[in-house]
Image: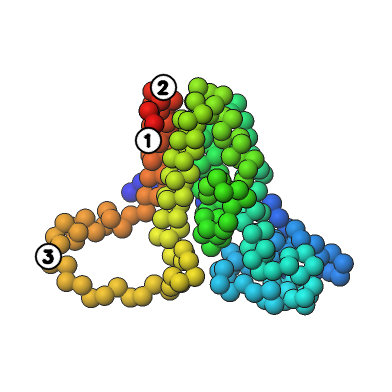
Amino acid sequence: MTEEPADPDTPDARGGAAMVVPAASSRTPRGSLDRRRILGAALEFIDEHGIDALTMRRLGAQLGVEAMALYRYVPSREQLLDGVVESVVDELYGDPDVHMQATHGWQDYLQRLAHGVRRIALAHPAVFPLVATRPPAAPWVRPPLRSLRWVESFLDTMTGNGFTDDTAVAAYRAYTSFLLGHLLLEISQRGVPISSRDDTEPADAPDTDLSQYPSVVRLQDLLSQDESAAEFEESLENLLDRLDRLRREPRQR
């Protein structure tokens, strides 16, 4: 039996999550507390315990300080969550496989960026719903890119490679919708709650009579297979083909 190839975007395949903020699970030495270290500790805490478990008191305990000491750097839990989202998206800048400029063409640029975002979602699945839902830096910024620098890079790449302003914006909308929809579905299938109202422990499946659904029963094994990596790649390639047609034949408003 042929062994399935490892998913190249998973943390295990890349030697661990590529955090650009320092981990801080041990007690913090006096005088070494700063905003970047607090965000690193919060990200580590959410990765391990989930968003709903995060409080300023628990985060302070993880850092070895009183919760009040954190408010000098992050005035509220809401600003703490915003900072965590910013830190996670910033991991794209430290990913050597993601390029800010399309040195090998716009399709290569979008391929690299998409896989970079997917690596973030798989490395920090409990944080990714925040990336999708926290208020953006500007009203026109769509998740999961979240960064004005990345939006600027995206639009410059598209308009510099034959896209009109209209088709570049259409490409931006289609691309971000694809990433957000696919990745939220993927982490949800891995058991990560998308919102605090979701159950972290799935309930037992009801005792359903499947006799009326012979196709479902017959194809159960196939339906149960995890094809996330292949589906992501195929969907991304289909999207790039669609954007190429859009570039060559701009649609009418």
Does label 3 or label 2 sit earlier along the sequence? 3
* Gap in angstroms between the C-alphas marked 1 and 2: 16 Å
Confirm whether residue 167 shows in the render: yes
* Gap in angstroms between the C-alphas marked 3 and 2: 48 Å
Does label 3 or label 1 sit earlier along the sequence? 3
Q: Which residue is mark 3?
A: 212
Does label 1 or label 2 sit earlier along the sequence? 1
As helix, strand or loop, the secondary structure at mark 1 comes to helix
Within the image, what quadrant is residue 30 found in? Answer: bottom right
Identify residue type, mark 3.
Gln
Identify residue type, mark 1.
Asn
Q: Residue at x 60, y 48 (%)?
A: 138
Q: Residue at x 65, y 48 (%)?
A: 90
Q: Which residue is mark 1?
A: 238
Question: In front: 142, or 17?
Answer: 142
Q: Pointers 1 and 2 in contact (CB under 8 A)?
A: no
Q: Which residue is mark 2?
A: 248
Mark toward the viewer: 3 or 1? 1
